[in-house]
Image: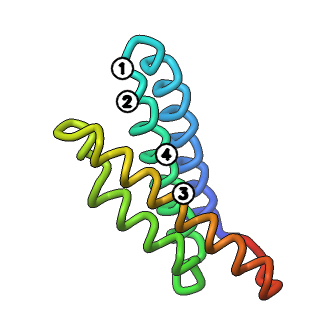
């Protein structure tokens, strides 16, 4: 692992940890759905980190999940119902994918 990669990776991990801790604190004072918003934003950041490390080998399913998150995460501001539908769809898609991966023996990254 070269020094440049290591520094960049460490910075990304640091940024994610700071985001998670800050989100945990601020969520204590916000409406409950904002906590859900912060959690899916965290999921998106983790998927983006995987993309930066794995490059062409990054998980295509997770890339689709990240795209959906980025397109829909701010619906919470306009429609809580629509945001909850998005959360339900994300969870349903992940459950289906997990089941498919277990059946096919594909390892989960």
Measured from the top left, where is residue 69 in percent x and y? 37, 57
Real-space Cα separation, disc 4 to disc 3, in angstroms:
15 Å
Q: Earlier in the sequence, mark 4 or mark 2?
A: 2
Q: Nearer the viewer, mark 1 or mark 4?
A: 1
Determine which quarter of the picture holds residue 74.
top left
Is residue 25 shown left or right of residue 69? right
Is residue 97 shown left or right of residue 107? left
Real-space Cα separation, disc 2 to disc 1, in angstroms:
6 Å
Please state which of residues 95 and 30 is positioned toward the viewer in this rendering. Answer: 95
Residue linked to disc 2: 34
Q: Quadrant of the C terminus?
A: bottom right
Mark carried by residue 31 = 1
Asked if disc 4 and disc 2 are in contact, CB closer than 8 Å, the reply is no
Q: Earlier in the sequence, mark 2 or mark 3?
A: 2
Q: Residue at x 21, y 36 (%)?
A: 77
Query: Looking at this rendering, what residue extends furthest in the left direction?
Result: 78
Measured from the top left, where is residue 88 in percent x and y? 46, 53
Q: Nearer the viewer, mark 2 or mark 3?
A: 3
Mark carried by residue 91 = 3
Residue linked to disc 4: 42
Q: Quadrant of the N terminus?
A: bottom right
Badge 2 crowding class, 10 Å Cα cut-off, few under 14, some 14 to 19, many 20 or more, is: some
Q: Secondary structure at mark 3?
A: helix
């Amino acid at each position: 692992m070269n020094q440049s990669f290591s520094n960049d990776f460490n910075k990304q991990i640091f940024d994610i940890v700071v985001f998670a801790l800050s989100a945990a604190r601020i969520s204590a004072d916000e409406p409950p759905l904002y906590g859900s918003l912060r959690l899916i934003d965290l999921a998106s950041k983790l998927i983006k980190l995987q993309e930066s490390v794995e490059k062409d080998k990054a998980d295509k399913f997770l890339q689709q999940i990240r795209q959906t998150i980025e397109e829909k995460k701010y619906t919470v501001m306009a429609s809580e119902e629509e945001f909850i539908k998005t959360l339900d769809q994300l969870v349903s898609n992940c459950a289906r994918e997990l089941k498919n991966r277990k059946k096919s023996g594909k390892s989960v990254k």
